[in-house]
Amino acid sequence: MPVLVMKFGGTSVASLDEIKNAAKRVASEVSAGHSVIVIVSAMAGKTNELVQWANETSPLHDAREYDAIVSSGENVTAGLMALTLQEMDIPARSWQGWQVPVKTSSAHSSARIEEIPTKNIMDKFSDGMRVAVVAGFQGLSETGRITTLGRGGSDTTAVAFAAAFEAIRCDIYTDVDGIYTTDPRITEKARRLNKISFEEMLELASLGAKVLQTRSVELAMRFNVKLRVLSSFDDKEPNIGTLVCSEEEIMESNVVSGIAHSKDEAKMTLISVADRPGIAAAIFGPLSEVGVNVDMIIQNIAEEGRTDMTFSCPTDQVLKAEKALNGSKDDGDINFSHLVADTNVAKISAVGIGMRSQSGVAAKMFQTLSNEGINIKVIATSEIKISVLIDRKYMELAVQSLHDAFDLEKVT
Amino acid sequence: MPVLVMKFGGTSVASLDEIKNAAKRVASEVSAGHSVIVIVSAMAGKTNELVQWANETSPLHDAREYDAIVSSGENVTAGLMALTLQEMDIPARSWQGWQVPVKTSSAHSSARIEEIPTKNIMDKFSDGMRVAVVAGFQGLSETGRITTLGRGGSDTTAVAFAAAFEAIRCDIYTDVDGIYTTDPRITEKARRLNKISFEEMLELASLGAKVLQTRSVELAMRFNVKLRVLSSFDDKEPNIGTLVCSEEEIMESNVVSGIAHSKDEAKMTLISVADRPGIAAAIFGPLSEVGVNVDMIIQNIAEEGRTDMTFSCPTDQVLKAEKALNGSKDDGDINFSHLVADTNVAKISAVGIGMRSQSGVAAKMFQTLSNEGINIKVIATSEIKISVLIDRKYMELAVQSLHDAFDLEKVT
């Protein structure tokens, strides 16, 4: 029987009623003839409670103990889901990470899955079991300690199981019914996409469309796992959600598939930096050392041997960045005049694999923003993405006008 | 370094503050030069929540899934306790049952510990670790499933570890400061015992003094583990509690060590049963089959070939007992006239190993009750115990007068 992986997030298993609701979806896939692997998160709120206890007990905690504590929520859901399925007369059992075992690296709290042996579960499928319920987010290190994969790790667990078991698809049940052309709270013209490519999804995920964990999309792309995002709260038929798949499976790719936005990025400018070889390394080396995630970088043209260097980083890393740069300033190596942080900005991005073959997207984007009187502060591009930093107050307007300009209302 | 086992129950680890309080007691034993194995229960209330979820999901649940669910509370406490100790600069780590592994039978929800390998933990002690924190109540079956030991199982875990590691003592921290001559709520003359024998403790535990799980006392007796019961909420020094030990270590044993009482027992009388060989088997066979725990049994003298048969059983099993007996009545085998259940009774017991060598204890007990005008309905005795059933309204009076009669106020 073909294997299907179904993953239910915290809100989809928030109570016994929700677990029952999720189990019904599993039951219908069993009826359709699938052997199902269900990956479950902890009941909504449970992991936060555990994280809070661990942090309060020990702010700089031993990550091995932290992992042992915070992984327990998934185990509870796995057992409850197995019991719920058994009540529906479906042969099911639960597996905790160490029972599979989901072998991971020893990087506690952000471990990477290294191997998932399939024999044990496949044997049970052969014996008549129809559903294997697996606690997500967790694994086992080489030394026999419990590891966790980091926040959102259950998505990664699901994709890794789909890859290991060569599943026909990996369905991610969540509280939204798919991936949208933009945030529906900003414009009601936002449309659900039936399909989106891995590459586009990666750009959108890293731009703050928090439906799927970035690592899970990377993994799905590497192993060509068909990922489907759909709602566990939607009772309309068909509940098809959005399929995240390889580019080849998308007949007619959109020039632009979506407009993403983020308010969590700040613009930092170093005024009057010496324009000499090695200056970029001197600036971004210390930032990297303290863990600041620099996204966009631009360097103005130099005048009289001095230049301005602008970059963006997450708003909550601004203090850390300032401290690191002011520290380096005293080394005399960077020697800038002063540092200006602007947290009152938003990042707007247009994403689409069609950009590869079609020119003029950037021009259209800039013209649209210009027509609305919106000034662009920083620009960055990749093969399938154009991002700009603008004043935060124009964020909604920018998203709406770009959504119109690229005809996203008509996208399917 | 000598190994000491310390066990903290649910109320002793009910919050982060309580866990810190418990950790301080562990720290002081570490300072005293012990290698400590700490056995923890789930935070008070957590296991009940999990049990309720499992029962609500599936009333007749798969015990393997039930065990996987309800064991998770202890894992959280174990991790939090390890972190708390690390914060106090004490080298500590947690072990879940499967990591030790605590090998048990496959009787899920009431598994028996079969083996506890010591090498892994002893190696860590040799490497400088001072405290091993172990999640109580749980183990691993031969097939790699999680088992639990039944309610109060953490006491059993603690004693089993003390036996396996040849610990100098097993300290059970709880919400009372020791074993008393009787319930202090009934008479303020109740005194804490400094020492009590395993045999006496077993009688008291099974009589409803719920401080220690019966199985843990049996295990301690078999392996001669010195068990100490003491309060984790008592800050007075010395906090010595009560030592439960072998008879040989008690210099001067008391004739009577304690007066126990129980309101959870009912008196059942079968009126006019045929007085013939095999009648007792015909009555108690069906009761045993449906799981009724019969405690005391008496048979009146026969008149004209008929007799009355009286027995006691837990109050919550009365309906089950009635159903079983009325069912058998139709078989014609028992052929009693009718069945009278009296739930308005109390069981009072005097327990003491001194009874073995001293006579007159029963006579003194009956005389004392008679002086108070209390009628005895049923009597049962063992080598170190005399129990009577009386009207419930006399329960307090009976306990108080017997406590006085046996001079328990002066016991140490």
Image (spheres, coloured by chain):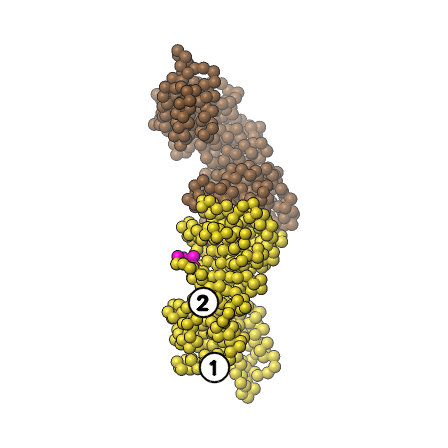
Chain colours: A brown, B yellow
Q: Residues within 10 Å of mark 2 (few under 14, many from 20)?
A: many
Secondary-structure class at tag 2: loop
Residue type pointed to by label 2: Leu
The residue at the far bottom in this view is B304
> Mark 1 — residue?
B363
Up-down relation of residue A354 to residue A237 (above or below)? above
Residue A164 placement (x, y as % from top left): 61, 39
Q: Which residues are magenta?
A: B231-235
Up-down relation of residue A316 to residue A128 (above or below)? above
Chain under label 1? Answer: B
Whether residue B149 is visible to the viewer of this picture, yes or no, is no
**CB-based contact (under 8 Å), mark 1 and mark 2:** no
Residue A188 placement (x, y as % from top left): 39, 33
Residue B234: in magenta span:
yes
Task: Please state, as top left, top right, bottom left or bottom right, where the C terminus of chain B lies in the image.
Answer: bottom left
Residue type pointed to by label 1: Ala
Up-down relation of residue B147 to residue A244 (above or below)? below
Marker disc for residue B193 = 2
Q: Residue at x 56, y 65 (%)?
A: B221
